[in-house]
């Protein structure tokens, strides 16, 4: 069967190959600095696909990408954080799914960008030590937002950035995003989104993304601590500014 016959309607082979390469690059970025790749991915998908397709497709691709990252770095996952944030995430995804096509995504993007910038550069307490109730509520709010704007990795990162060990931070972030995207895909299936049409493209992008994850995981331990922390902040800032640009212009 020709490669083009496996692609969604309206997507040519050149663009499909570009998206597969993009998956490798975004996974490399995310595995090295914990985040940034998901937002870049949703921005590019928005240029290629209709709005109604972008969020569910992004969720399925990121499920594979983050799942690969979580597997590679599973030894460093902080499960005591994952449990309660994921519980809230399951609740929030169901709630957010009811409003996925109703809420103004632009206003939410501006709010998320402002929140990320403020929490990245202003002094603040470590959120990681908060109560289980706060973790459940935080997970619910973030997952509800993800059903509307797609990429909420920066919010998850802000919530756990108090983790001192960067390997714990990256691995825990990967596991949380894997669970969040699992919930998201399940809800979109129940809402009737036809993933089957996009499955070959999703599989190709997930496989490519795993290669980027493997390389990025090696780079993670080689980047000096100070460079990692500054890189983490810079990636957060670039992501937030790009969200503002997209929302305003």
Image (tube, helix red, strand yellow):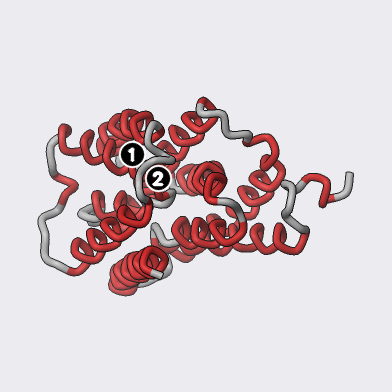
208 is higher (above) or lower (below) than 97:
below
Residue 61 in picture, x, y percent from top left:
56, 46
Residue under pointer 1: 144
Residue 204 seen anywhere in this rendered image of the structure? yes
82 is higher (above) or lower (below) than 24:
above
Do labels 1 and 2 touch, CB within 8 Å? yes
Frontmost residue, 220 versus 31: 31
Checking the image for residue 136, the label placed there is none
Mark 2 crowd level (few <14, some 14–19, many ≥20, 10 Å Cα): many
Frontmost residue, 56 versus 211: 56
67 is higher (above) or lower (below) than 87:
below
Left or right: 198, with 13 as reference point = left
User: Residue reaching furthest top?
Assistant: 190
Residue sitting at 19 percent across and 47 percent down? 128
Quadrant of the frame with the C terminus: bottom left
Residue sitting at 14 percent across and 67 percent down? 122
Left or right: 205, with 4 as reference point = left
Residue 219 in picture, x, y percent from top left:
47, 66
Quadrant of the frame with the N terminus: top right
Residue 143 in picture, x, y percent from top left:
34, 40
Report how far apart the C-alphas of labels 1 and 2 lie in the structure.
Answer: 7 Å
Residue sitting at 69 percent across and 48 percent down? 201
Residue under pointer 2: 148
Frontmost residue, 233 versus 13: 13
């Amino acid at each position: 069967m020709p490669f083009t016959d496996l692609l969604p309607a309206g997507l040519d082979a050149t663009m499909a190959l570009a998206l597969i390469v993009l998956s490798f690059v975004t996974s490399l970025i995310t595995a090295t600095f914990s985040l940034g790749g998901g937002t870049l991915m949703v921005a590019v998908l928005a240029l290629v696909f209709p709005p109604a397709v972008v969020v569910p497709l992004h969720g399925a691709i990121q499920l594979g990408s983050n799942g690969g990252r979580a597997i590679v770095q599973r030894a460093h996952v902080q499960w005591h954080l994952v449990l309660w944030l994921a519980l809230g995430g399951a609740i929030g995804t169901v709630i957010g799914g009811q409003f996925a096509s109703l809420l103004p995504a632009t206003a939410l993007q501006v709010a998320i960008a402002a929140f990320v910038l403020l929490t990245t550069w202003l002094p603040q307490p470590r959120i990681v030590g908060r109560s289980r109730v706060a973790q459940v509520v935080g997970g619910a709010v973030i997952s509800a937002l993800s059903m509307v704007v797609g990429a909420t990795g920066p919010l998850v990162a802000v919530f756990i950035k108090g983790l001192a060990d960067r390997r714990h931070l990256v691995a825990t972030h990967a596991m949380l995003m894997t669970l969040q995207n699992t919930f998201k895909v399940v809800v979109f299936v129940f809402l009737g989104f036809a993933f089957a049409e996009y499955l070959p493209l999703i599989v190709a992008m997930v496989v490519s993304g795993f290669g980027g994850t493997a390389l990025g995981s090696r780079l993670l331990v080689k980047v000096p601590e100070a460079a990692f922390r500054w890189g983490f902040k810079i990636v957060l800032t670039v992501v937030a500014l790009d969200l503002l640009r997209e929302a305003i212009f």
